Amino acid sequence: MIRLLCFVVAVPALPFRAKLRLEAENAVLRHQLNVLRRTLHGRVRLTNYDRWFLIQLYRWFPSILQVLIIIRTETLVRWHRAGFRRYWRWKSRPLGGRPPIDMELRVLIRRMSVENPLWGAPRIHGELLKLGFEVAQSIVAKYMVKRRVPPSQGWRTFLHNHAPDIAAMDLFVVPTIGSTCCMPSSSSGWIAES
């Protein structure tokens, strides 16, 4: 049903699409003639505008590759890819943020955290502020030496330490007035009463 609907919508646009493709090919041919008129002798010199124009037409009408004469199709595709690379390099440029931390300050933070193992990031941050360094506490925590924390107890140790409490909790039920109580039923096992 969806394909039929897409077909019904696409059929009226077919003549216009073919006409647009033909107009794009004509525009490319005219542009190539203008470039050739500009450079009568020697090698063809393309400006950035010429490259941009051909790339934009290629983006919208890839069939123009068939009518390109003054440049190879690989060249046009290479320009297109280079434009994408430049665009995404520009898009992912750093937009600012915190200024970088000097190497000497990083070394000082590490040294303070190693020499004073009981000091955390707030204490080292306070000492750095007393020394005249304007740095955030999160930066201090980032550059501190990470210490290995002893692992927590395993399941076996936990069960051994808390076995009497677990048994008392699981095996003895004290029904109260506001709680639900489970009672055995003769036909279907356990049922809950409220």
Image (spheres, rainbow, N blue to C red):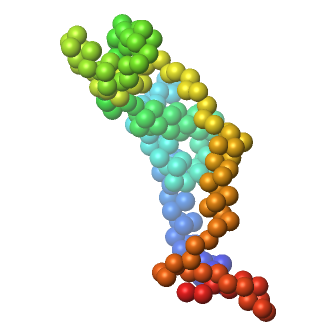
Residue 171 lies, in percent from the top left, at: 68, 65
Q: Is residue 40 visible?
A: no
Report the side of 180 relative to 97 (left or right): right
| Quarter holding residue 91 | top left
| Residue at image coords 50%, 21% | 146
Instruction: Give the vertical position of 145 relative to 90 (above or below).
Output: above
Instruction: Give the vertical position of 175 relative to 50 (above or below).
Output: below
| Residue at image coords 48%, 81% | 178
| Quarter holding residue 151 | top right
Instruction: Give the vertical position of 190 relative to 77 (above or below).
Output: below
Q: Nearer the viewer, residue 65 or 115?
A: 115
| Residue at image coords 40%, 12% | 116
| Residue at image coords 72%, 85% | 184
Residue 148 lies, in percent from the top left, at: 56, 23
Residue 82 lies, in percent from the top left, at: 52, 33
Quadrant of the image containing the N terminus: bottom right
| Quarter holding residue 149 | top right
